[in-house]
Image (spheres, grey):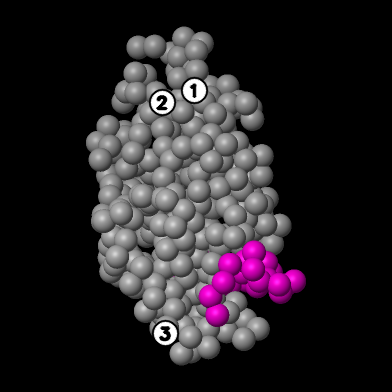
């Protein structure tokens, strides 16, 4: 079997890694511009190492291990990942990549290792389970045909707007909001909402600086970031990411403050993003969420989203 080796990745490797990810899952292309930006602006609350997998000296794939800064969490989960070009993808090559990343993660102090595979990837699933991992939880993915569901979405948007007007809720974009504290308010709202997202690993606090780096990523725009205002407070938000080079438009984030839940706000802001996407000529988009997140599952189903291939998270003691 060909020898699989690793070398540290550089910023110039981001495009190649995006190409590998796209080749493995062409239905979910990875955008090279967004990947490079993400590498350049990695969250300061996380530690991550990236590697290029080589076979006989030529680039063939990638490998990473990542974990939160240990001072920010009470449980030490380390995430290992990697993949190879389809021509080089085998049980052996995937196993070597995961084994090397597990070693790196253990050396960094991880107590629990986490790996992920798509539901339709029996090869990777078999490699992961063969290394002693057990299924932890599943992530749901959805696709939305904005052409077929146009009438449903626009009608739902009008109903949501009327419901918000009756409650005195204003719907607008961050670009149109003059409040100098708007970014801080969205950050605080997001941190609160993140605590309620189903997860096994501990929540990792996001600094305001990291939040702003995310907001400035190439696929994000303030005039496409929708918020809901109740007086002086921002009580909901939803934003789509528009990949600059390739890939489907995706729901990056939707959140509602705990004090305002049950009032249809999440649906209202999400409707605004979809109606805007229709106006911009987008024909298809995707989203994803944890399989145990019942409220957002319900919203997706009623908006016309159709289930796509999901993901499986696996865990094992380090």
Report x, y in % for residue 149.
28, 60
Q: Is residue 141 visible?
A: no
Marks 1 and 2: CB-CB under 8 Å? Answer: yes
Q: Position of residue 164 (x, y in %)?
A: 46, 83
The residue lying at 59 percent from left, 60 percent from top is 223
Query: Local crowd at mark 2 within 10 Å, few (<14), some, or many (≥20)?
Result: many
Q: Quadrant of residue 174?
A: bottom right
The residue singled out by tag 1 in the image is 53
Q: Is residue 104 above or below residue 248?
A: above
User: Closer to the camera, 272 or 112?
Assistant: 272
Q: Is residue 10 left or right of residue 61?
A: right
* Residue at x 47%, y 70% (from the top left corner): 269
User: Disc 3 marks which residue?
Assistant: 163
Residue 34 in the magenta stretch? The answer is no
Q: Work out whether 1 lies above or below 94.
A: above
Q: Earlier in the sequence, mark 1 or mark 3?
A: 1
Which secondary structure, mark 3?
A: helix
**Residue, x 57% and y 84% (percent of image)?**
230
For marks 2 and 3, give the CA distance. Answer: 49 Å
Q: Position of residue 213 (x, y in %)?
A: 66, 52
């Amino acid at each position: 079997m060909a020898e699989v080796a690793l070398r540290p990745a550089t910023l110039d490797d981001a495009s190649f890694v995006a190409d590998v990810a796209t080749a493995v899952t062409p239905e979910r292309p990875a955008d090279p511009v967004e990947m490079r930006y993400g590498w350049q602006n990695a969250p300061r609350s996380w530690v991550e190492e990236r590697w290029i997998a080589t076979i006989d000296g030529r680039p063939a794939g990638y490998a990473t291990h990542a974990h939160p800064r240990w001072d920010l969490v009470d449980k030490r989960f380390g995430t290992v990942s990697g993949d190879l070009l389809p021509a080089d993808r085998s049980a052996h090559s995937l196993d070597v990549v995961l084994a090397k990343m597990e070693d790196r993660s253990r050396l960094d102090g991880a107590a629990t290792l986490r790996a992920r595979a798509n539901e339709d990837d029996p090869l990777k699933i078999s490699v992961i389970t063969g290394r002693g991992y057990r299924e932890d939880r599943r992530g749901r993915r959805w696709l939305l045909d904005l052409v077929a569901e146009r009438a449903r979405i626009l009608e739902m948007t009008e109903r949501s707007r009327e419901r918000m007007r009756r409650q005195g809720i204003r719907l607008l974009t961050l670009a149109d909001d003059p409040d100098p504290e708007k970014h801080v308010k969205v950050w605080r709202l997001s941190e609160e909402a993140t605590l309620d997202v189903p997860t096994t690993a501990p929540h990792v606090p996001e600094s305001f600086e990291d939040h702003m780096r995310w907001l400035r990523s190439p696929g994000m725009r303030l005039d496409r970031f929708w918020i809901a205002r109740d007086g002086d407070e921002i009580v909901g938000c939803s934003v789509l990411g528009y990949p600059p080079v390739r890939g489907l438009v995706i729901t990056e984030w939707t959140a509602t403050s705990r004090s305002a839940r049950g009032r249809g706000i999440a649906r209202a802001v999400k409707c605004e993003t979809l109606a805007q996407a229709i106006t911009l000529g987008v024909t298809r988009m995707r989203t994803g969420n944890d399989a145990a997140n019942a409220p957002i599952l319900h919203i997706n189903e009623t908006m016309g989203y159709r289930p796509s291939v999901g993901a499986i998270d696996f865990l094992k003691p380090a």
